[in-house]
Amino acid sequence: MTPTIRPLEEADFEQWLPLWQGYLTFYEAEVTDNVTRETWRRLISSDEQPHGFCAVDPKGKLMGIVHYLFHPVTWSISDRCYLEDLFVDPNVRGGGVGKHLIEAVYAAADKHGADQTYWLTQDHNTRARRLYDHVATLTPFVKYKR
Ligand SMILES: CC(C)(COP(=O)(O)OP(=O)(O)OC[C@H]1O[C@@H](n2cnc3c(N)ncnc32)[C@H](O)[C@@H]1OP(=O)(O)O)[C@@H](O)C(=O)NCCC(=O)NCCS
């Protein structure tokens, strides 16, 4: 089944929320309600980032979400696209929803003129990496933070 992929809309909030919470739980992370509200406000604002897509089944049920943003870089005149969050309802995993969500970000990045789309993942996230190995190229970079 090919899911419908479309931008998140205001009316999606009730369905987006459990997917967002599922994503946070997957990462054993918590954010305050204030952060969730502000993230949602930005996602559906036409002139702010990040942007978001959802995958929808024929009955209008949200099956997955992806959030992404563009930023300038010093190595190109073009912006770069950072894919920040990707989550698919556990009940429909393995059916191509994640792949279609990534491809929607690729299409948005092409439309924007981005020179690259990239993301981070945990090295032990084997399920996600099986998908990523099909749609992207593994780089040797590692993440540092303070
Ligand atoms: C990672 C995640 C988004 C993948 O979503 P999904 O809808 O299951 O992804 P897809 O169905 O498009 O692809 C995954 C499967 O298809 C396979 N696949 C994808 N493209 C393929 C191709 N061209 N040929 C063969 N197999 C392919 C993958 O190997 C993978 O196989 P699996 O069922 O054994 O795991 C989902 O598992 C998830 O939400 N996980 C929890 C949160 C998470 O890890 N998010 C990403 C953090 S970086």
Image (tube, grey):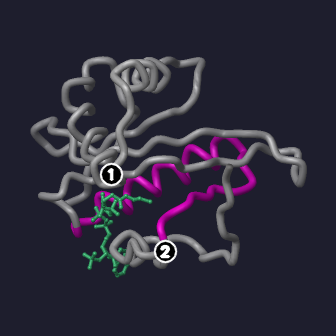
Tag 1: amino acid:
Glu
The residue located at (66%, 69%) in the rendering is 142
Question: Picture coordinates of residue 4 (x, y %)?
Answer: 28, 45
Numbered disc 1: secondary structure: loop
Numbered disc 2: secondary structure: loop
Question: Picture coordinates of residue 100 (x, y %)?
Answer: 37, 57
Q: Tell me the residue that label 2 is attached to.
A: 123
Tag 2: amino acid:
Asp
Q: Mark on residue 28?
A: 1
Q: Earlier in the sequence, mark 1 or mark 2?
A: 1
Q: Is residue 118 magenta?
A: yes
Asked whether 20 or 94 is in front, the reply is: 20
Q: Left or right: where does residue 62 sit relative to residue 36? A: left
Q: Left or right: where does residue 64 sit relative to residue 47? A: left
Mark 1–mark 2 distance (CA, rounded to whole Å):
16 Å
The residue located at (44%, 36%) in the rendering is 52
The residue located at (49%, 18%) in the rendering is 45
Please report the bounds of the magenta region as a residue range. Answer: 94-122
Up-down: is 117 above or below 84?
Answer: below
**Cβ–Cβ under 8 Å for marks 1 and 2:** no
Mark 1 or 2: in front is 1
Question: Picture coordinates of residue 105 (x, y %)?
Answer: 51, 49
Task: Please identify the quadrant where the N terminus is shown.
Answer: bottom left
Up-down: is 23 above or below 38?
Answer: below
The residue located at (79%, 40%) in the rendering is 72
Q: Does the numbered disc 1 mark a residue whose Cβ is under 8 Å from ligand 1?
A: no
Question: Picture coordinates of residue 20 (x, y %)?
Answer: 31, 39
